[in-house]
Amino acid sequence: QVQLVESGGGSVQAGGSLRLPCTASGYMYKNYGMAWFRQAPGKEREGVAAIDTSSTSYADSVKGRFTIPKDNAKNTLYLQISSLKPEDTAMYYCAARVETPGWVPLSARLYNYWGQGTQVTVSS
């Protein structure tokens, strides 16, 4: 059973930074592609960053501000967010899928496993 647990959310002021960890268990972590999504109230779930063994991808809206480092020794994926904006306010989810090497999609329908989410609220 694949399990993903996010943490690190909270309330921050615009311009600040956050690091969201996602701890994975229950499968061969290094053989899975992983991603971060977010969903604001009344909006569709949006893919913001994805990573596999050799590649990363980012949504245009977050390029230059978000990175998706991964610590294989700790089975932990991170979302590093800087220069936070009020429009970054959302529930942030970690997700996983069986890896297709070199393909790092940002479509929610392609991911099979999801965490419970962690809330990020940015005030101006």
Image (cartoon, helix red, strand yellow):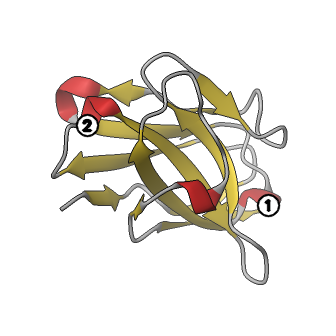
Whole-percent x, y for residue 22 in the image: 36, 49
Callout 1, which amino acid?
Pro
Image coordinates for residue 40, horizontal then vertical, percent = 71, 73
Can residue 124 be seen here? The reply is no
**The N terminus: image quadrant:** bottom left
**Which image quarter holds the C terminus?**
bottom right
Residue matched to label 1: 86
Residue 29 x, y percent position in the rendering? 25, 37
Q: Is residue 88 above or below residue 77?
A: below
Relative to residue 6, is residue 41 drawn left or right? right
Residue type, label 2: Tyr
Q: Residue furthest top?
A: 54
Question: Circle 2 — which element?
Answer: helix
Q: Nearer the viewer, mark 1 or mark 2?
A: 2
Q: In the image, is 54 to the left or to the right of 37?
A: left
When the figure is inspected, residue 106 is found, relative to residue 101, above or below; the finding is below
Q: Earlier in the sequence, mark 1 or mark 2?
A: 2
Write down the quadrant of residue 65 in the picture. top right
* x and y, in percent, of residue 94 in the image: 46, 54
Residue occupying the point 20% across, 32% down: 74
Q: Which residue is mark 2?
A: 29
Residue 74 is left or right of residue 56, and the answer is left
Element type at marker 1? Answer: helix
**Residue closer to the observer: 98 or 123:** 98
Label 2: how many Cα within 10 Å (few below 14, some 14–19, many 20+): many
Contact? badges 1 and 2 (CB < 8 Å): no
Write the residue at 59% across / 34% down. 104
Query: What residue do we see at 73% from left, 57% from top?
Result: 88
Q: Quadrant of residue 61?
A: top right
